[in-house]
Amino acid sequence: MERQYFMVFMVLLVAVALTGSVSAADTNCEVGVDVKYEYADDNGNINPDIQELTDENGTKINFTRTFDPAANMTKIKFNYQNITNTTKFTVKIRAPGYRELSHTFQLTDYGTVYAAHLSLTMNATEAYKLGRETTKKADQILNFTRTGEVLVITTAGTAYYKNQTTEDALEGILNQARGIVSYGKGNLLMLRKTRLDPLDFAFIVRKGNDLILAYFKNASMTPIYIGTVSQNMTLTQYQALQKKLGNDTFPIASLANAWAIGLSADILREAAFHGHVCMGTISGYAMIETLLKYYPATNEFGLPLEGVSYQVIGVPGGSDDDVFIYAMDATPGKRAYVGFNTTEDTNIVGFIRWNSKTKKGTLIIMAYNLQDLISKYKQETGETAVSELKFNAWAVKKLTTSPETLVKILYAFDNLTQDQVNYLMGYEPTKGNTTIAAAGLDLNYILNQTNLINATPSNSSYSTGNLTYGDLKNIGRLAAEKAVELFQAMGINLERDDYQLFVLTSAGYVRLNNQETSPIWDGIYDILGSRLSRKTLLPVHAPLWGQLKFDFCLINGTQKIIKSMYYNITSGTLVVQNSSNYRIEEVLPYDPPFDVLMGWLFHNHVCGGSSPGYLIADYIFNTYPKGENEKYIYVTTLDNCKDDILFMLLGVSAGQGTYANQRLTSDETTLETTGGGMNGMVGYIIIWDEKTNTGRVAVITWQSPRFASGSNSYEEYIRLYKHDYSSPNLVSAPVVSTAAERLINKEELGILLAGGTGSMNALQYIFSIPSNRTLEDLIPVNNGGTPVNNGGTQGGSTGGVPSGSAGGISGGHSGYSPGVDTAASPAEVGAASSVSEEPASTPSKAYEVKNATSGASGGDSSWYVYGIVGVLVAAGLVAFGFLRGGAGK
């Protein structure tokens, strides 16, 4: 009987095996995934990413995938035990610009394999739709797909849309334009704002000698303005533009006209980072060119991972400061930039070049003389009334041919000691422990140092190469093809549009033979589909004289496979390296938000010191949201890596006077409730009302979180960024708070931006301000009636015709339409503002014309022109300038 039972059991087992109902061993499974997209022209152009495969128990299944471009189908293969026809699997799919798709399915037994064919449709995200539909509408208006030439300026990438990051809007623009717009062509500019600002799109085409703009405001698909934005527009035309665009008039007009005259893509990106193109932007690059010619970089110095070739001592409020931060990679978070209002002249800057062998440095102090440049412009062009846009065009030509003619070297000293560097820049013997506060550009101190001797300049020659867009693009293609080859040697086939493949490169920042290198991005995209808007092509901040480098990083779970190379400019070949170039790969497995990733790229590496930046910015946005007439001004007091993230996310700018770095000591920034080092009073945020000239200042404190031993701090921080505090590794949460909050007036703002008073630093001064004030205490009331504007807009005049004109050029373009000299007739009106300096953020200094501290310019007061914000002149004649504060530098 037992033998009969055994035989029955064997028969049943064979029957089960033949029917495929049960498999005791792994069974081969194959799924063909045919993805269609809401936008039909994306079919065949986007390779979907199979993000995850799980069984009905939620267990992740390892699989391999291949993309068949001929069939436009992704095939995934895997093995699974004990599969039946009723076993359920779930696949998660994502594609750039589309909502993640989750689909549950079953397989069919085909004898030797279980298989299924899935036909799925993915829906676009709202931001992607907005980018595509706005671009489509703009093309209908401007017909740029016919001409093949267009410039797009947008706040997408920084502004949020429906509480979400907006990189998908950038993707929508690129996919709708289909190659006419690309990062590598330099005709897609991200205008740096904050997440609180509106999502705007500007499309500009050239029509003969005119530039035509279609401007879409606040995520609307109906343009609020269609018309000219060229430097030749009339006063009436400009006023119509200004009425529609408001504060964005000068940024859009200056960027559009600079693009039209051929300003290089890397300078245009810096200008969009700063907010506009102006004389300060152009002169800042001229200073760098002059510095590299006469005092070239020798080696890198600084804290580990943060080595820089120069340290920069600036005076916020001059647009040139943003050029140094951007083009020299001299960021405040790397302790390479320090600046607050130590002098009246915002067009002056100090560069420190350190020799680590001799332990001595060279201090070079430069400035640009606006009035001298205006005189040269008039002399060479025969113009009497100066339009800023036309003046910019003249200056750009000078920048290309003879940059040193735009600037002056005031002083160059050798023999600078470490103690003198520490006095000017501050001293941090160990990370997070500052023992000497930064004095900034203290000219009295510098000019009274008896050990300093005049430096002997070299005379380096820099030739400009003749590589075409196609040549540079091909370097990107070759690098990507080399990466494909290196991974194939490991048995790994790289696929196009892979979300897990990241390309990190210095292309776009560095130059080859003084040529900008962003076309390389387009070459990489052609081979791998890597793009910034997809978070898969990541330009890493580097100085423009740096080396062209590439890291190709493939993420598999938390494992990272990296292949690195650099471009040998002498041989014109790519050289494979054994070690990686960058330190950003650490965060890539955890899908950081787009905006903080942009902050880390700006910082050029990830580290524990930078991680708090996003959480502090988040606190500021939530606790102190800025209103319609308000702007942020942030001042660092406890300087470390997080400040680069704050700089990027808060949209503040040393060049526009909305960021300063005072760098106090750890003792001065410590509260009883906080620790020392990187904790304490890290800075203060000012929410400044440009209409009433009043503001709120809040001292921000930070206390670091504690994570369980052995946990990955980057993963844990990114959880916190996504407002997920559920991790078991979170021992104690971070604490961001306000130590003090006060209302301030214009005079007090000036004191804060100057670093305090002689007896109190800025933090002490804030605590000394009465805490029980009201706005009524700060805003004068006219005979008990309507509150009086307390001095106009930030940096403004008190009304009437602008003061501070010099050489026939009215000072300042904030708040003005284009015009002519106050002595000129309306018939002479040009397209732009007068050439002027943008108002310094310190109101008390904004419309003064004074000498700088001793020795700044030999006592020549004509060196210093400060912007004035005024009101429209009666009878419709308006003074010179553009709306955006800071447009003149």
Image (cartoon, helix red, strand yellow):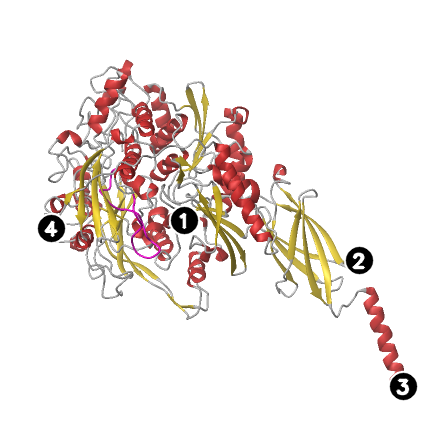
Compare residues 267 and 244 and report the one nearer the observer: 267
Determine which residue is flagged by label 2. 110
Determine which residue is flagged by label 3. 1
Does the CB distance between marks 3 and 1 fall below 8 Å? no
Compare residues 237 and 207 and report the one nearer the observer: 207
Give the Cα distance between marks 4 and 2.
85 Å
Q: How crowded is the residue under tag 3: few (<14 C-alpha within 10 Å), some, or many (20+)? A: few
Q: Is residue 319 visible?
A: no
- Element on which disc 4 rests: loop
The magenta stretch is 297-318
- Element on which disc 1 rests: helix
Does the CB distance between marks 4 and 3 fall below 8 Å? no
Which circle's residue, 4 or 2, is located before the other in the chain? 2
Determine which residue is flagged by label 4. 758
Discs 2/1, front: 1
Residue 888 drawn in magenta: no
Residue 735, disc: none
The vertical placement of 103 against 777, above or below, is: below
Give the Cα distance between marks 3 and 1.
77 Å
At 50% from the left and 37% from the top, the residue drawn is 473
- In which image quadrant can residue 198 be found? top left
Determine which residue is flagged by label 1. 601
The residue type indicated by label 4 comes to Gly
Give the Cα distance between marks 4 and 3.
107 Å
Which circle's residue, 3 or 2, is located before the other in the chain? 3
Q: How crowded is the residue under tag 1: few (<14 C-alpha within 10 Å), some, or many (20+)? A: many
Which circle's residue, 4 or 1, is located before the other in the chain? 1
- Element on which disc 2 rests: loop
